[in-house]
Amino acid sequence: MQVSDFLFKTDPIAAIATGGNASAIAIIRCSGEGVIQKISTIFRPKKQAQDILTLPGYRQVYGSIYDGDYLIDEVIISIYRNPHSFTGEDSVEISCHGSVFIQKRILVLLNKIGIRPAQAGEFTLRAWKNRKYDLAQAEAIADLIDSRSETAHQIAIQHLKGQFSDTIKKLRQDFIHFASLLELELDFAEEDLEFADRENFNVLIKNLSTHIQQLIDSYQIGKAIKEGIPVAIIGKPNVGKSSLLNQLLQDDKAIVSDIEGTTRDLIEDVIDLNGYLFRFIDTAGIRQSDDIIEKLGIERSMKAIERAAIVIYLIDEKGITVDDEVLLNHIQNSQKLLIKAQNKTDLINSPTTDWIALSVKLQKGVELIIENLLSYVEKHNINNRTIVTSARHVFLLEQTQKELTQIQSDFMEGIPTDLIAISVRSAMNYLGEITGTIHVDNLLENIFSKFCIGK
């Protein structure tokens, strides 16, 4: 979709909002100028008094859709009057039977009477254009649709309600205040007046920088929650990594064998634990090997450690080896959450100190692994924080932070106020791009083209 081609359109559009597959019920949503009048030409209400042309918004009418004298389906029509609709325009939703034939036949009929097929994301684009949502809120709609866990859903809801947008708008307002003081000084440059103490400027810059850095830092956990917190299961061959993965997933995802080196590739799957999505990676056992394929698997395992936020390091009843100690030191230096567990403790009397005693075979100790996984999320205290989940947003925040660093440096070096004001305006623009206060067509195209048709 070329957004510039659709940005100012108000003509009526239509799309299936329920996926398009066969189902008990399907919903076809329509929006745009004159949409109610057009649909009135093909809809016959069961009760003649219920003319949709005269009905107020938030009303439903039962009747039939006809193509000439041909009855297509009995439907329920929902009426929404502007500006009280998702798009801010007059809108109609047609609830019909979910036959694929019926859905397509109604879409063809709608196109025939001048209601064209919508482009991907065009409904949400119109909602943004009509100021029902800002750009960050519009993106949250896509996140809400894609949410796969309770926590991801909660964060998307917070963004949709405007919590993140309000934070950005407050930061941008601080920059506007900052810029106004600088501009005032420029207006009275000949009088050599300063309208703000430079120390106050430094305090303002420091506070802005602190808040923005907190948002930037939240992206790591935000991305993990959205996509699944990556957990790598690491250890020597045959210590029970695949068995532990199967136990956590409650599924025989990985092949379990007594033969060393069975797992030669990464096996990934996700699981919802207490509303948090974890993405588990079962890796090839790490050891010295001459097998080319196994070597490749081990290399991928090392890369999995780098990608993981959490590492479950597994040993067996034989205890810690020198190779284990080398790898453990490497993981501990990476500042990742390290969960150390000793499997097959049903075969020994004294488990290794400070390691979780585990017997996957007897299903003992797995609950302690889960408790440690959940502690990672609790440590980040996400419930009362604004969490960034978008790569676009964090990039713009990082650019804003760079401008702040430049502003702080310029103040210290005594750079002229007019040059500092340029950096302040640049920072304001970066924040404006997050909410859509400042926008360009290719940015909008990149965002809305990712939406499904019907949204």
Image (cartoon, helix red, strand yellow):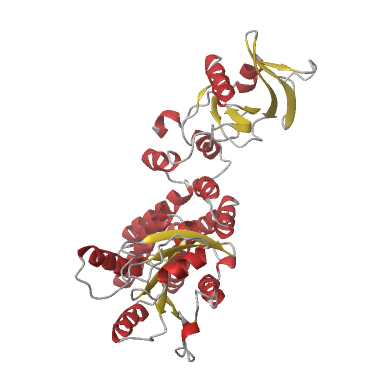
Q: Residue 54 in the image: x percent, y percent? A: 74, 20
Can residue 1 be spotted in the picture? yes
What is the x, y in percent for residue 313? 40, 77
Q: Position of residue 63 (x, y in %)?
A: 73, 20
**In the displayed structure image, the side of residue 304 where residue 150 appears, left or right:** right
Residue sitting farthest toward the front = 258
Q: Is residue 254 above or below residue 38?
A: below
Q: On the picture, is 335 further left or further right than 218?
A: left
Residue projecting furthest to the top: 69
Please say whether residue 185 is visible from this viewpoint: no
**As rendered, which of 18 and 294 lies closer to the eye?**
294
- Depth check: give the residue in front, 106 or 262: 262
Residue 1 drawn at (x, y percent):
40, 32
User: In this view of the protein, which residue sits in the foreground, 376 or 246?
Assistant: 246
Q: Nearer the viewer, residue 262 or 279?
A: 262
Give the vertical position of 375 relative to 80 (above or below). Answer: below
Among the 4 quarters of the image, the one containing residue 403: bottom left
